[in-house]
Image (spheres, coloured by chain):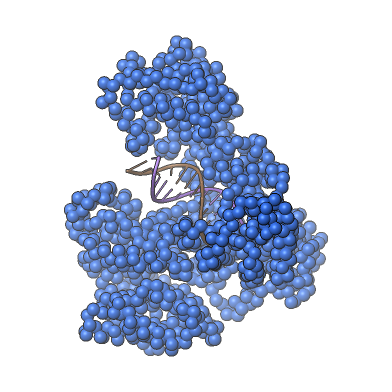
Chain colours: A blue, B purple, C brown
Amino acid sequence: MSPVPFSKCDVIGMAGHDDDPIHEEILKQFSFLSFVLSTEGGQTQERPIEINDGQTQEHAIILEEILDDDLTGQTQEHAIILEEILDDHIPQEHGENQTGHVQLEHGDNVTSHIHPNEDNDDDDNIGKVHSFGDYGTYFRHKHIKQQKSDKEYREWDKLRNNGIERPQIFNKMVFHVNGYTNPSINELHRLMIIHGGLFLSYLTKKSAATHVICDRLTPRKLVEFKHCKVVRAQWIVDCIQEGKLLDWKAYRTIPDIDYAQKRLSFGCTMAQSDSMADSKSEPESKSESKLSNSNSNLDVDFSKSDDIESDPEILPLTQSQKVIEEQYGEPPRILDAKHPDFLKSFFAKSRLHHLSTWKADLRLKFLRRIVQQQKCHLQNTNTLFTKVILHIDFDCFFATASAQNYPNIDFQTTPIAVSHGVNTSDIASCNYVARSFGIKNGMWVGGARKLCPNLVCLGYDFQKYEEYASHFYNYLLLRDDLDTIFPVLIDEVLVDCTLTVNKNNTNGSGVGVAKEVDVLMSTIRRDIFDLTKCTISIGASHNVLLAKLALRKSKPNGQYYLSSNIEGFLEDVLVRSLPGVGRSIEKRIAQEIDVEEPLIQHIRTLFNEQKLCAMLGKATGKKIWNYAYGIDDTAIEFDENNKEAILGRKTVSLDVNYGIRFDKVDQVDKFLMQLSQELYSRLISLRFCGSQLTLKLAIRLPEAPIDPPKYLGMGRCYFVSKSSRLGVATNDWGIIGSELKSLFRIASVQIKDLRGIAVTMSKLEDAELMKRSRQKTLDLNDLIVAGSKRRKRTVTGSSDYSVDKIDWDVFKSLPKSLQLELELEQIKGGSVGTRTSSTKSSGVIPSPTKPNGVKAYLQQLIPYQQGVLPEYVRVVEKSPTKKAIRKQLPKKRSASNPPSSPPNWQDESYNTSVLQELPSSLRAEVVRDQQISRKFKHESLKQKLLDKQNILRDVETITQAWIDSKATTVNRSPLFLNEKVTTLSMKKKIQKWIQETVEEGGPHPDDVQVFAAYIKQLLTMGDLTRSMVLVQEMENRIDYEFALLNRDRNRQVGVEVWKEVKEDINTLISQYCRCNKIII
DNA sequence: CGTGTCTGCAAG
DNA sequence: CATCGCTTGCAGACACG
Ligand SMILES: Nc1ccn([C@H]2C[C@H](O)[C@@H](COP(=O)(O)OP(=O)(O)OP(=O)(O)O)O2)c(=O)n1
Ligand SMILES: [Mg+2]
Ligand SMILES: [Mg+2]
């Protein structure tokens, strides 16, 4: 603890709180306050407070409340208020009119005597500032006041120190304190200013600071403060101790650990691992490998394990996959995200993707089940019952399951891990033999091999995992004695079995419950083992937290019912094993108390709830404090009143932080489009639309190497995220895609430093409800664009509604890209009025590359199949909103713009306003012209040649993929509305569908979705031919309906809508073709 | 203070 | 060759008015 120079201060008015550490703390930090506030202190240099505003009373009351407050944990908050009040009340000028004073007296409580001057009430400027109604002003003033009060405080401190000024070691230095520090920010503040430093609160420009005091540096902060000297708080303390300025470099804040640091000093242990491996398992490598350790490391990899076991039958599946892949001769290998098939191939092999997908599927399945059965109503409410929660989990699931592919490996004695690679590859799961070496799930193989050189790495077998999980879950469902089943993950469930185990406990004595629990657990374990030959463990207790901790104790292949001596049990539990405590929080706690691996008893004895909350935040602190005493009220029941619970989720997202290596923006754009489609298909299958889109980018940290240790990994990164309100819920991938591109440009990052991309759709709505909102957006017809004065939308006052030509309320609800579009349109039209802060309010930074206007993306040249006229398939960003707007837009720009779009802009972007109006054959010509002229402009002859070669190569590979995809889908066909359908019956359905809905103004959006999903499924199965036949059928029928229009104009809308639908389906197909490089 | 956006953490 | 570092929800920090 740093010295408190005010210890001799009079502490008054606090008699009732002498023993309260919190009040002491307040007093310590603000002990000078008691002087200032005291009129009875007896010290000559003290003056009564002079109050010249009308709000003394308010402050006095706040003060009283704070000092009288029995609630703790609000020290910080109170400190701020105190500080503020102090700022306000420190005498500005000696001899001002005294209009009242605050008097703090000895006694049980603080009392205040207020004598406000009623006549002076009109002078309430300052009072207004502080009336909590205008926080903007409040905070602006606060900064200035703070500096002022700092000065006052320094002067006062000098007086306290017998007139001797403290060494001004921090002279001319400006500090900013960030995050939780030790000592606290208030203490630091005090220390800095009395030693001549300037203190900047977080409200001011951080860049003005010469030093940033920060004990914990996250990657993002590292970037933010990269031009500052970032030091630990200890520096301040030590400087003062020494009475001079110490070298700040010795106190540099070290960045938090991340992926790269897991690796530590891999590579230095070459000799050691070499010799170990040699002696053990690879005699033939002994002779050759003096230098290379890679060989010896490889020897235990699954790809060579057949050598070790000399059993050809245990060839892992992944091997055969490779063989198949290689049969193609020279297909361009899928390395990074530039390859069009990357996404698919990545997800197919990503364990975390599988885990997440399985989890979501299971949740959905069980949600449905609960809703269907209304089982939650049956929940027991008998308080006499002993509540019992089971936590069931497979032992080292992946490792156990994968090892079954290798019958010759002795699972009980061989250290086994599941991974893709051999060095920087993650270990998904390792068995308990491996764990005895200290190996853990999530470690890199390289690191693990240092602990255990003989570690055997096996490949993944996702199919098998899925299979076992389905055995597992079906079994649980089959049992009818489990009240609630809550899937945590594929290999892990929480079960409420209160009713079952209490069946002999009708009198509430609790007798026999333990036995019932034990029997139930043994039965489940035995049955699951019989089903899967995998061992599972079960923990049981009366709440979720304790069940989890019991599970940990029971592992491996065990069971544990934690029902008595819970306090004692908890004592020696690692803090880290509490749910919600991970690496970061454990480290923070460990640092604070200087214990390597803190236990719960440390929390109990060395912390209190306030301290935890100060360190970890209010919610987290409280949660952990409760956990330390075994208190947990997490419910595993389904709350049907919760709207989100019924929707099942709040967001749908898609992350790729592997293989992201781009050079040019159009590569990024292409990938973003793929992400859009993936997101789209997830939204469709969940029947969701969303109205907020977030793009999160992982960017290489400046000091991180270009190539991270892990091949194509993300390395050390910081994250940037940008989000956009779409205004209308959608799932359209055209909209999503163009919005993403727009967001990407706003983020303005170095493309080569991009290491990860994530896309999140939030503000979800049921697609069912979307239909209605869609109708609403059509009201945008009210939107009129003509010469108009812009105003920032502040109040939605109806009075000036008619004055504006644009309904800004509607405008604001549009996606940013659309807003910008409209603005551009206005600029073009030369009708821009006063451009107030509209740019700012739309949040879009205009930049040369930004104009993401009404564009369509020319995706791929697709000549139709059987000699039909070639046609360019457009992918239009369709959206009712956009269309509605576009109708209102003058078309001038469109005519002149397209051929001369900015060179920076992606090649594929076109303005379609005009193209849309043209017959497709003519349109094709225009497009081709544009392409040619662009090529001519921007590309050298050499480039052209290269392009040609590329096309040729594409054709070649495509043909093979094409043939192959046809071959693999001979006798499979997806269900449509759960029915088996033939192409012919499907054609008939389409005809009927179109015929019937044209009169109703087009198909129901949901039906379209179902149909689109069907087509997509066809495509996924490689049945391109059939999809195209079906679309052709649609087109024919629509043309037919179109021809009939003369007879019945009412059907025009329906036909138009149908044309759009057809276009969308076409888009789907062309996308598929493009992704697979298929040219038909 | 109430709200929104961005960042960080945890889980498996 | 390597390697496949996902997805969701919650909470905190900070900005804005
Ligand atoms: N960092 C991690 C952690 C887990 N998993 C996968 C592999 C595991 O087999 C599965 C289940 O995770 P568990 O935490 O249950 O770990 P295990 O089942 O492997 O071991 P145990 O449950 O015995 O502790 O999730 C993973 O891929 N990566
Ligand atoms: Mg497990
Ligand atoms: Mg598990």
Q: Is residue A736 above or below residue A545?
A: below
Q: Position of residue A227 (x, y in %)?
A: 47, 41
Q: Is residue A788 above or below residue A1072?
A: above
Q: Residue at x 44, y 26 (%)?
A: A63
Q: Residue at x 55, y 72 (%)?
A: A333
Q: Observer-nearest residue: A813 or A824?
A: A813
Q: Position of residue A569 (x, y in %)?
A: 71, 46
Q: Observer-nearest residue: A698 or A727?
A: A727
Residue A1056 seen in the figure: no
Q: Quadrant of the C terminus of chain A?
A: bottom left
Looking at the rendered structure, the number of numbered marks drawn on it comes to: 0
Residue A611 seen in the figure: yes
Q: Position of residue A1055 (x, y in %)?
A: 29, 79
Q: Quadrant of the N terminus of chain A?
A: top right
Q: Residue at x 39, y 67 (%)?
A: A768
Q: Residue at x 38, y 28 (%)?
A: A58
Q: Observer-nearest residue: A943 or A440?
A: A440
